Amino acid sequence: LKTALFPLHFWLPPAHASAPAPVSAALSALVVKAAFYLVLRLWLDLFPGVATAGAAAALGALGAAAVVWGTWQALRAERLKLLAAYSTVAQLGYLFLAFPLLFALPPGAARDALFGGVVMLALTHGFDKAGLFLAAGTILRHGGHDRILEFGGTAQRLPATTFTIALAGIALVGLPPSGAFLGKWQLLTAAIGSGAWWSVAAIALGSLLATAYVFRVLSHAFGHFAYPARAVTVAREEWPALLLALTGTVVLGLGGAALWPLLEGVA
């Protein structure tokens, strides 16, 4: 329930979308990740003799449903913060896709790599989603709203914020050089190696729908319509969001080689 795994996600979209932007950033980056960390520790450390293949498959199925449902609702969202909230539901689903794969893989390099990929996904999502929520808060403050259909002119008036949204979108889709690309690569490798083609289908469909909602936001942001605020270019309030998005998209991605031995050691 605290991790907001589908169908127990009902509290997350209204809570994240209605809270002030810094609170939404902390909720998405830390609160649900802490709950997922507890689930992972309980599963691997406390219940290794009780957890069954059926339980792992059930968690994986709920994760796949979260990926598809969350990205579809994000695509239909009318507000940027609501879009970000539903995409959090989807991104958490990717983490739960790993449970049946971790159960199927024997201890060894492949299992450690998958565990490292899951941690990389969680880290990347935390940084990039926090940056996205802060960017939405900047747009809300200077434009008076965060309605996606009325984003015309945002790229001209708030270029750094628009760039932050684009960077966060790269990670949400799972494109290189983001850390999410490394995590999804390990998920796909493990799913294909285990013959879990339903997981492959969920990852592919979720990535395609994420591409659609990211481009939907950017297409409206680059529209040449009047923006109801003065121009703000790389204001001090925009830097935190931009730095968070750069960390998840560039630092964790390009620096993944240095980080990977640590992640495998944790596994």
Image (cartoon, helix red, strand yellow):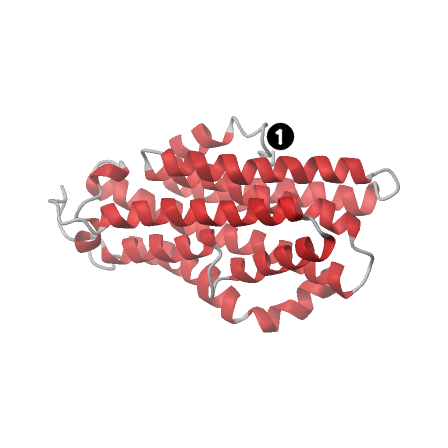
User: Could you say where residue 135 lies in the image, as x and y percent from the top left?
Assistant: 33, 48
Residue at 41 percent across and 62 percent down: it is: 246
Residue 123 vertical placement versus 26 (above, below): below
Residue at 36 percent across and 34 percent down: it is: 77
In the displayed structure image, the side of residue 126 where residue 192 appears, left or right: right
User: Residue 241's quadrant in the figure?
Assistant: bottom left
Residue at the right extreme?
49
Residue 3 vertical placement versus 156 (above, below): above
Image quarter where the C terminus lies is bottom right
Looking at the image, which is closer to me, 129 or 87? 87
User: Could you say where residue 110 lies in the image, as x and y percent from the top left?
Assistant: 74, 62
Q: Is residue 233 visible?
A: yes
User: Residue 53's quadrant in the figure?
Assistant: top right
**Total residue callouts:** 1
Helix, strand or loop at disc 1?
A: loop
Residue at 62 percent across and 43 percent down: it is: 34
Residue at 45 percent across and 48 percent down: it is: 208
Q: Is residue 20 visible?
A: no
Classify 10 Å Cα crowding around label 1: few (below 14), some (14-19), many (20 and above).
few
User: Residue 56's quadrant in the figure?
Assistant: top right
Question: Which amino acid type is shown beneath numbered disc 1?
Answer: Leu
Location of mark 1 (residue): 1
User: Could you say where residue 239 lies in the image, as x and y percent from the top left?
Assistant: 33, 58
Image quarter where the N terminus lies is top right
Residue at the left extreme?
226
User: Could you say where residue 262 lies in the image, as x and y percent from the top left?
Assistant: 68, 67
Looking at the image, which is closer to me, 231 or 101? 101
